[in-house]
C-alpha cells in the first residue's frame, strides 16, 4: 500500500489564454497556480 502526494506551485506572468467568460471582474497579469494530486496504490 503506497500513498503518493504531489504538490506544485507556479508564479504566472501574463494572461494570454485565460477566458474573459471565466473572469468577469477582469484579470491580473501576475497570478499564482497551486495544484495537488493524491494517489493510492494497493
Image (cartoon, rainbow, N blue to C red):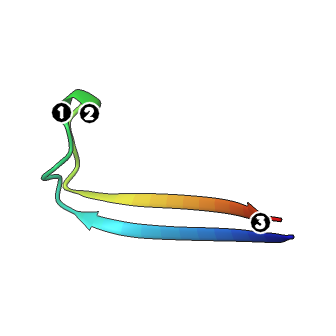
Give the residue at x 78% y 69%: 3
Give the quadrant of the N terminus. bottom right
Q: Are marks 2 and 1 in contact (CB under 8 Å)?
A: yes
Disc with the residue nearer the chain's start (3 vs 2): 2
From the top left corner, tell me how far across and down residue 7 is, in percent: 57, 68
Residue at which label 1 appears:
20
Side of 39 relative to 19 (left or right): right
| Res 38 quadrant in image | bottom right
Q: Secondary structure at mark 2?
A: loop
How many discs mark residues in the rendered view? Answer: 3
Identify the image quadrant of residue 5: bottom right
Instruction: Report crowding for label 1: few under 14, some 14 to 19, many 20 or more residues within 10 A (C-alpha).
Output: few
Q: For mark 2, what is the residue?
A: 23
Instruction: Report the Cα–Cα distance between label 3 and label 2.
Output: 37 Å
Residue 23 image point, x, y percent: 26, 33
Residue 32 in picture, x, y percent from top left: 38, 60
Q: Residue furthest left?
A: 16
Residue 41: numbered disc? 3
Amino acid at each position: 500500500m503506497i500513498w503518493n502526494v504531489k504538490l506544485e506551485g507556479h508564479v504566472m506572468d501574463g494572461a494570454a489564454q485565460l477566458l474573459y467568460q471565466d473572469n468577469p471582474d477582469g484579470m491580473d497579469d501576475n497570478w499564482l497556480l497551486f495544484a495537488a494530486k493524491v494517489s493510492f496504490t494497493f
